[in-house]
Amino acid sequence: MTDHDHNTDELNDDEGLAVITFENEDGETIEFVQLIAFEYEDSEYAALTPAANLGTEEVELFVFSTGVYEDERFFTPVEDDDLAQRVFDIAVQLLGGTDAEV
C-alpha cells in the first residue's frame, strides 16, 4: 500500500465509520475502516482495520500517521518501530483492549 493512493467514503450504517480505500502495488483495492483517531505528541494517528473483518472475532489493527494536506486526508505508515509500538499500544488501550505487539 502506498500512503497517497486512498479514497475516503462513509459506510451506510448507523455507526458512520469512515471507510478508507487503499490501492496496493498490484492495483488491488483494500478497504479499511477507521476505528479511532487520536493525538500523541502533537501528531495525529488513526487506527484502521480491514473492512472485511468487521463483525468477526478476528480484528487486525493498523495504526497510521494521518493529517490533511490541500483539503485531502492522508495516511502514512509509522516508520519508527518504537513510535509505532507506542501509538499501537495507545490505540489498543483506547479501543478497550490489552497491549499487543505490532
Image (tube, helix red, strand yellow):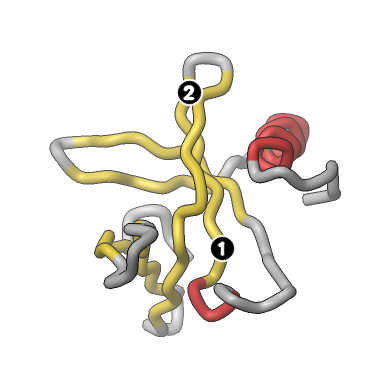
The one nearer the camera, 82 or 13, is: 13
Q: Position of residue 87 (x, y in %)?
A: 66, 34
Q: Position of residue 6 (x, y in %)?
A: 32, 62
**Residue shown at the point (59%, 76%) measured from the top left:** 55
Q: Residue furthest front?
A: 14
**Residue shown at the point (14%, 39%) measured from the top left:** 71
State the mark number for residue 39. Answer: none
**Residue shown at the point (65%, 37%) measured from the top left:** 94
Q: Earlier in the sequence, mark 2 or mark 1?
A: 2
Q: Position of residue 49 (x, y in %)?
A: 56, 63
Which residue is under mark 1? 49
Q: Up-down: is 63 above or below 14?
A: above
> With 60 as the anchor, is 12 left or right in this view?
left
Q: Is residue 6 visible?
A: yes
Which residue is under mark 2? 43
Three-letter amino acid code of the residue under disc 1: Thr
Label 1, residues with CA under 10 Å away: few <14, some 14-19, many ≥20: many
Q: Up-down: is 5 above or below 25?
A: above
Cα separation between marks 2 and 1? 20 Å
Q: Residue furthest top?
A: 42
**Residue shown at the point (41%, 54%) measured from the top left:** 3
Q: Is residue 80 visible?
A: no
Q: Position of residue 65 (x, y in %)?
A: 49, 38
For numbered disc 2, what is the local secondary structure? strand
Q: Are marks 2 and 1 in contact (CB under 8 Å)?
A: no
Which picture quadrant has residue 11?
bottom left
Q: Residue furthest left?
A: 71
Three-letter amino acid code of the residue under disc 2: Ser
